[in-house]
Image (spheres, rainbow, N blue to C red):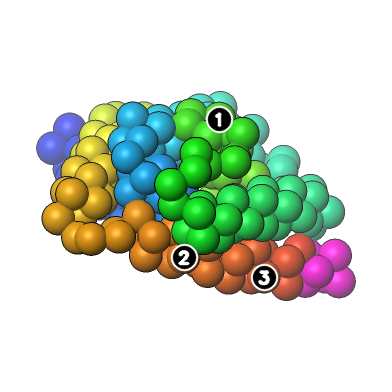
């Protein structure tokens, strides 16, 4: 049986592997923080972490074994497409009118949770990476995993906040980059949803 230290180390590595790659949640965190709303950005990250906690509990309870139906994944993907396009348009508008308050009504914790919970990529990650390692190391792995997720959220918010204070018009650059990244993920998700339906 793996030791507690091994479970913590593997969990931390697993958490960083999920949180480190740039994606829709990171784009939304960057956008909110760069616009001077770092608390909202942090809540986005916490919302996504809560979604991962939901998946964690589903994996521990064995529920996800019954979920990978292609039609269910397609529904998740199409919901993710709509959400990402909504945020992409909001980010683009914010970049063009940086002095106006953002128009997006869904933000903070709900935005992070919905972005993460509707992502079939996140679900696939849990099925292919999270579930096997949880089976091997047990729920203790979650301590290292969630510590790594929360550390990544805190570090990201600090970097985005620092950038917004040090770089002129930082929020405009981040808004445009976030809009393009979110739109690209929406296209990728749309293609993925179609592939789920064709399979």
Discs 3, 1 touching: Cβ within 8 Å:
no
Q: Is residue 173 above or below residue 101?
A: below
Give the residues drawn in magenta, as a range. Answer: 194-199
* Figure quadrant of the N terminus: top left
Q: Where is residue 129 in the image (x, y as percent from the top left)?
A: 44, 54
x, y (%) of residue 195?
A: 77, 71
Contact (CB < 8 A) between labels 2 and 3?
A: no
Distance from the alpha carbon under mark 2 to that under mark 3: 17 Å
Is 157 in front, or is 198?
A: 157
Sequence-first disc among 2 and 1:
1
Identify whether 185 is placed above or below 52.
below
Q: Distance between the residues labelled 2 and 1?
A: 22 Å
Q: Report which residue position mark 3 lands on.
A: 187
- Where is mark 1, residue-wise? 110
Marking on residue 176: 2
Query: Above or below — where is 176 with respect to 36?
Result: below
Query: Measured from the top left, where is residue 42 in percent x and y?
Result: 34, 34
Q: Quarter-wise, where is residue 37 in the image?
A: top left
**Label 2 Cα neighbours within 10 Å, binned few <14 / some 14-19 / many ≥20:** many
Residue 108 x, y percent position in the rendering:
47, 31
């Amino acid at each position: 049986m793996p030791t507690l230290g091994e479970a913590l180390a593997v969990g931390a590595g697993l958490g960083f592997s999920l949180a480190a790659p740039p994606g829709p949640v990171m784009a939304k965190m960057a956008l909110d923080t760069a616009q001077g709303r770092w608390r909202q950005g942090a809540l986005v990250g916490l919302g996504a972490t809560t979604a991962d906690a939901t998946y964690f509990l589903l994996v521990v309870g064995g529920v996800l074994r019954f979920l990978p139906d292609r039609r269910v994944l397609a529904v998740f993907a199409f919901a993710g497409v709509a959400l990402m396009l909504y945020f992409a348009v909001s980010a683009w508008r914010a970049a063009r009118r940086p002095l106006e308050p953002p128009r997006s009504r869904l933000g903070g914790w709900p935005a992070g949770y919905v972005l993460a919970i509707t992502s079939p990529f996140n679900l696939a990650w849990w099925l292919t990476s999270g579930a096997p390692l949880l089976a091997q190391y047990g729920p203790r792995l979650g301590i290292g995993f969630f510590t790594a997720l929360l550390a990544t959220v805190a570090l990201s918010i600090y970097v985005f906040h620092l950038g917004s204070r040090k770089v002129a018009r930082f929020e405009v650059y981040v808004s445009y980059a976030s809009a393009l990244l979110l739109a690209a993920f929406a296209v990728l998700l749309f293609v993925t949803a179609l592939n789920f339906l064709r399979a």
